[in-house]
Each structure stands twice: as structure tokens, then as C-alpha cells.
Amino acid sequence: MLTRRTFTFALAASSAAAQTMNADVLVYGGSPAGLAAAAAVVREGLSVIVVEPSLHIGGLITGGIACTDTGTPQFVGGLAAEFFDEVAAETHRLYPRPEAPKLLFRGQVLEWRPARNWDLEPKIARQVFEGWVKKGGYRLIRNQRVASVQVKDKRISAIRLTNGAELKAKVFIDASYEGDLMARANVPSTWGREGRNEHDEPLAGVRTAHFLRNYSDEYYNKPGIEYTHHGQFGADIPARDKAGKLLWGISSQKLAEPGSADKNIQAFCFRLIATQREDLRVAWPKPDRYLPQRYELLRRYIQAHPGISFARLVHFSAIPNGKYDLNASGPFSIDYVGGNVGYPGADYPTRDRIFQDHLDYQKGFLWFLAHDETVPRPLRDEVNSWGLCRDEYPDTGHWPVQMYIREARRMKGDYLMTEHDILRNKRKDDSIGMGSFVLDSHWVQRFVDDQGHVRIEGHLDESIQLSKAPYDIPYRSITPRKEDCRNLLVPVCVSATHVAICTIRMEPVYMMLGHAAGLAAALAARSGATVQDLNDAGFFGKLRAQGAVLHPGQARPVKATPAI
């Protein structure tokens, strides 16, 4: 039985005696940001301990996001650039003459965009990260969560883990996706969506149920048929069954006024690695708890679009070695819309239940498409031509260990990044890295419109060409206010609004912020300064000397390696 407890968390106390460990810097979260931070500390000659709540390091880069969202690669610098260059070099060593990737749908072979140097196999990404840990020579503690945090005079002095171990350091970095160390240190934070008026953000708050056309329609639609499902269901589907009961997955609450604030967050999923290669393909697994009634809306959606393709229900992106990164696509897909309510502030047992529920939902989604007799035979055959990859995640049934937590807590720090910083006020004197990806929020909730039809809202992708006009991310956005904490840095749950985090939240950006956090932590640990007082030319000069891209004029030449 594959559960959160069995393959990521062990909440019971360790059988080993509780220990006390010391380091100059403590990093909580073996995410890409956390591993970049640790590498930066080690390069400064200081000691570091990394605590990873799960069994596996690398977060979402090793956990399924294999088609990397970079925006514009020349603005990715420092340790992040080093990592992706190292992965690309190993990939080219293994596959010097790869075949052009293809997709097979309904017997038709479709040429597909070749994988890029930024697209990777998770097993290789994990290999590179494990090499970083070994080279760094630091202590890595896996499978433990932060239980409590000791704070004195606005400084964290120690944290206690769920196994009872006490870890002391001079400076702390919370590089987790949930911000649990930050929260337990009583640093103010929030989650959900701000209202439009709170920071004068036109894109903020509850969204209207707008319609979009999917950019990749030409690949999947029959001639003459135009689906608009990326923006809505493309049909007026009743939200209730014949008995008047709401279909599963549809909120009973009336949609709030557009632009209003709420505590909802964009949907989570698992980013799967799939293939049609017979030598690698493993059949879709049946969930431990399969509830076919969850997919009644999916069945009606399929019926409303005769001939709909699997690649219309799930988004495919090519990565090396005949594999594909699967992401959500459309209003009923692998995203579990509404399944993460309360997740950011939940206790660990509740988080585990939400994790398991997502696992059952997504496995059930694929099992329904592959086996339910109400699904048209051509679609079932198509789904069954795909499967998980035998050589990825062999210790967890070939399923990724990291749930895609697109956003959780966000710190209320020294500087709050808003829509204005992304689209207009782009330049920051204290920049520690750049972002260039589009504003991207996945769906938040399904609801019933005034005519009794199901609709969905929360999507944010204005197709703003940020890659042509990147924005700076200030150091102040990863530091708490001095009156809240003076020796903590937060490179993932940064100080930003929901709209701003929708573009900042890309893993290469988190790695760049982690690099800056690691360097700042090392300098603060060495000097005794508060992290807020490091905001000076010496710090930024050193960061730039380490390859960081801080402003548009410093764009990094991208290595001209051949396409994978």
C-alpha cells in the first residue's frame, strides 16, 4: 500500500536517541532552493545541516517537473545554471544521438517539440543533486519534520524535529514548500488570494469564469471541431444529477464577487513521467481507494466532446529518452481542483490525509480513463498505450514522491512583491535574481452558474510576455521584518501576493533565491550581522561574481549544446 506515510513521512519518533547537532547554518527543506543554499554555504567554508521532510531530495525537480519552466534561460544564473548545465552534460553523455520524440494518438504519429537542455529525466536530476550532497560533505537528515522552534530576542536558536533531535545554528533557511519553520518561528505569513483593492492588483482575487482557447488545439482536435475546454468545459454541463445532487468536485457555495479575497489556493497534482516505450512502460496503477463516482463530471465532459483525445485531458511535454512530463490540461484533469483546502496551515496528520487523497484522486482519474466501460473504447486504448516509466521512482511504484504544491504559505516580509513589481516596477536595487515566466495560476474551484451549469474559476495566464521584459526579485522579499526575526531567510515561501507568486514560483527561480539565501546566511553567520543588515554592495557584488544574473543587462550566454 503506497501512502504518504510509507514513502515520504515517518511521524513516529526515531528509535535512535534524540541528538543535539550544531552547524553554522540550518536549511529546512531539501528542495532545489535548499540544496542550492547548502552548496552556497559550503563554498563559503562554513558548516551546514539540511533537513528534508521526505525520503528524497530535489523537491519538484526530481519529483516530476521534468519539462522545466524557465521563461528565458539567459536570466537563470549562479548555482541554478550550474545544475542544469550539469544535468544536460550527463544527459548528452548517455544519449549522444537521441531519436526525435514522437507522440502516437489513435494510430497517428505526431512530431513533437524536441526536449531542450532544460528538460530532464528525474533520475538524472536526483543523481546530480545526490552528487552535490556528497561533494558538499554536509549532514543530510531525511524523513523528519520540524516540530517546534526556539526563538530568543528575535533570533531562532534551535529547532526540534519530530524524532526529538535538536538542531542549533547561527542562521536558518526555510526552503520548504509549506513554510513550516517560518510559521513555527511566528514569522507572519498568509495564504490564499488577496482582493483587488488590497494592493491595487487588477488580476487579484476571485476570477471571472472566462473562456480561453488552448494554444495546442491544432495537435488534438478533429478538423472542423474547436474545443474551448482550456478556459471552460466547452459545453453547458448540468452541475447536478437527476436527483438534484451536486456532482462530485463542484462547490456548493455561490461564487464570490470577482476580485474579492478568499483563502483558496490553486490546485495541486503529481507531475507524472510517462512513456509509450514498451520496454519502459508500466501500466497505470489502481488506487488504494477507487471511487468511480468522483469521475461522473469527467464522463459527461467526455460525452460532450466526441472524439476527445487523451492529450486533450492531460498535457504532454517531451523530455529525453522517449519520456514525457504529464501536467494538467483543462477543467477536469490530473489537477485535483478544490482538494487542497486548508493545506497550508494544516497539521501534519491532516496534510498526510490530503496527500493520500490527491494520490487516490489522480490514480483514480487515470484508472477511470483506462478501464471504465462508459469511456469510449478509442480513448481507453489510447490511455492504455501509455504508462509510468519503469526506471523512474522504482522504490515508490514509479510514482513521484513530491506533490506539486504550487503555492502554500507566503511570508509577510521586508518587501511584498505584487503585480506591480512583475509588470511595471521591475527594477530593484537589491535584486538577487530575475523571473521571466508568465503569470500562471491553475484552477481554484468549480461552481454552479445561475443556469445550473458547472463552471470553473481561478485560472490566471494572461500570456504576458515576461520573457521579453523580466523583473528583478529583491533581497528584501526573502527576509522577514527585523521586528519578527533576524536570522531567518525564506527563498521559497517568499513575501509576495498570490498574483506575484504565480510567476515567481518556478524552480529555477527558487534555486537562484536559494543560492542568494545561502550566501547571505554564510555571511551573517560569519559576521554576526542580522540578515536584514546584509543588504549592501559587498553582498550583491559577491553574488554577481558567483554567476548570478541580477539585472537584464547581465544576461548569461546559454551554452549552445545540441538539442536533446
Image: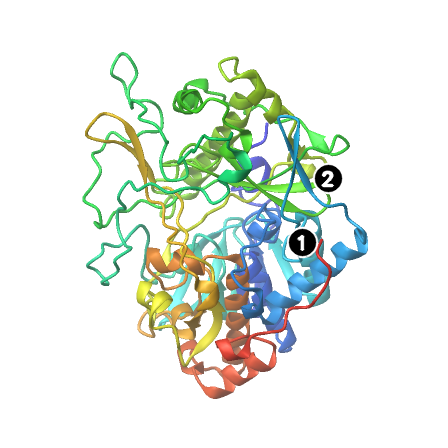
Gap between marks 2 and 1, in whole Å? Answer: 13 Å
The answer, for residue 348, to whether it is visible in the render is yes
Whether residue 279 sits left or right of residue 149 in the image: it is right
Residue at figure coordinates x 49%, y 21% from the top left: 290
Q: In this picture, is 476 found above or below 268?
A: below
Mark sitting on residue 292: none
Judging from the image, what secondary structure is the residue with disc 2 in?
loop
Q: Nearer the viewer, residue 2 or 223?
A: 223
Residue at figure coordinates x 71%, y 41% from the top left: 322
Q: Quadrant of residue 249?
A: top left
Q: Nearer the viewer, residue 9 or 365?
A: 365
Q: Amino acid at mark 2?
A: Asp
Q: Quadrant of residue 502?
A: bottom left
Task: Tell me the crowding category of disc 2: few under 14, some 14 to 19, or many 20 or more residues within 10 angstroms, Cα based.
Answer: some
Whether residue 306 sits left or right of residue 8 in the image: it is left
* Residue that label 2 marks: 391
Task: Name, please, the residue furthest toward the front.
Answer: 224
Q: In this picture, is 266 found above or below 72?
A: above
Q: Horizontal and vertical percent for residue 273?
A: 62, 40
Whether residue 375 sits left or right of residue 547 in the image: it is left
Q: Quadrant of residue 343?
A: top left
Q: Quadrant of the N terminus?
A: top right
Judging from the image, what secondary structure is the residue with disc 1 in?
helix
* Residue that label 1 marks: 125
Q: Horizontal and vertical percent for residue 468?
A: 47, 67
The answer, for residue 184, to whether it is visible in the render is no
Q: Amino acid at mark 1?
A: Ala
Residue at figure coordinates x 31%, y 29% from the top left: 250
Q: In this picture, is 74 found above or below 253?
A: below
Q: Nearer the viewer, residue 349 or 86?
A: 86
